[in-house]
């Protein structure tokens, strides 16, 4: 018989790494942040959305499982982003003048 695991909808995509596999004082994002260069000098930190940025996304029929985990860096959110359901931790930044959305597992 196969093993079936259920997850509450609000936790889908989170708790990806069981706590026993995380170093003390680290969260699920620590390794991804290092890979993204967050530990390097001159790294521009990710920031939370400004209220007007969030309003624009919501007005364009976008939703997010947790807007506090939608992070941006040096970016103007395009008004053309519509009808997207963001899940997990989202990092949105420009890439050579082209908008890129980076999804990371929780």
Image (tube, rainbow, N blue to C red):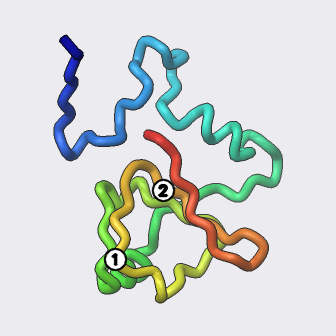
Crowdedness of circle 1 by 10 Å Cα count: few (<14), some, many (20+)? few
Residue 99: quadrant of the picture: bottom right
| Residue at the (74%, 79%) spot, across then down | 97
Disc 1 on helix, strand or loop? loop
Percent position (x, y) of residue 65?
29, 56
| Residue at the (53%, 37%) spot, across then down | 29
Quadrant where the C terminus is found in the figure: top left
Q: Nearer the viewer, residue 68 or 77?
A: 77
Tell me if residue 93 comes above or below residue 26 in the rendering: below
Q: CA distance from mark 1 to mark 2?
A: 16 Å
Q: Which mark is residue 90?
A: 2
Left or right: residue 15 compared with residue 90: left
* In contact (CB < 8 Å): disc 1 and disc 2: no
Q: Nearer the viewer, residue 71 or 100?
A: 100
Crowdedness of circle 2 by 10 Å Cα count: few (<14), some, many (20+)? many
Q: Which mark is residue 6?
A: none
Percent position (x, y) of residue 46?
59, 57
Query: Mark 1 against mark 2, which lies toward the viewer?
Result: 1
- What residue is shown with label 1? 83
Quadrant where the N terminus is found in the figure: top left
Percent position (x, y) of residue 75?
62, 75
Residue 101: quadrant of the picture: bottom right
Number of marks drawn = 2
Disc 2 on helix, strand or loop? strand
Residue 8: quadrant of the picture: top left
Q: Nearer the viewer, residue 30 or 14?
A: 14
| Residue at the (62%, 67%) spot, across then down | 100
Mark 1 or mark 2, earlier in chain: 1
| Residue at the (39%, 20%) spot, across then down | 18
Left or right: residue 43 compared with residue 63: right
Q: Residue furthest front?
A: 1
């Amino acid at each position: 018989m196969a093993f079936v695991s259920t997850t509450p909808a609000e936790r889908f995509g989170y708790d990806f790494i069981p706590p026993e596999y995380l170093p003390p004082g680290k969260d699920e994002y620590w390794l991804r942040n290092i890979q993204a260069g967050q530990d390097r000098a001159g790294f521009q930190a990710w920031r939370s959305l400004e209220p007007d940025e969030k309003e624009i996304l919501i007005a364009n029929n976008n939703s997010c499982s947790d807007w506090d985990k939608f992070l941006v860096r040096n970016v103007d959110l395009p008004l053309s982003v519509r009808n997207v359901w963001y899940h997990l931790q989202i990092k949105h930044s420009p890439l050579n003048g082209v908008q890129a959305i980076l999804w990371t597992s929780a």
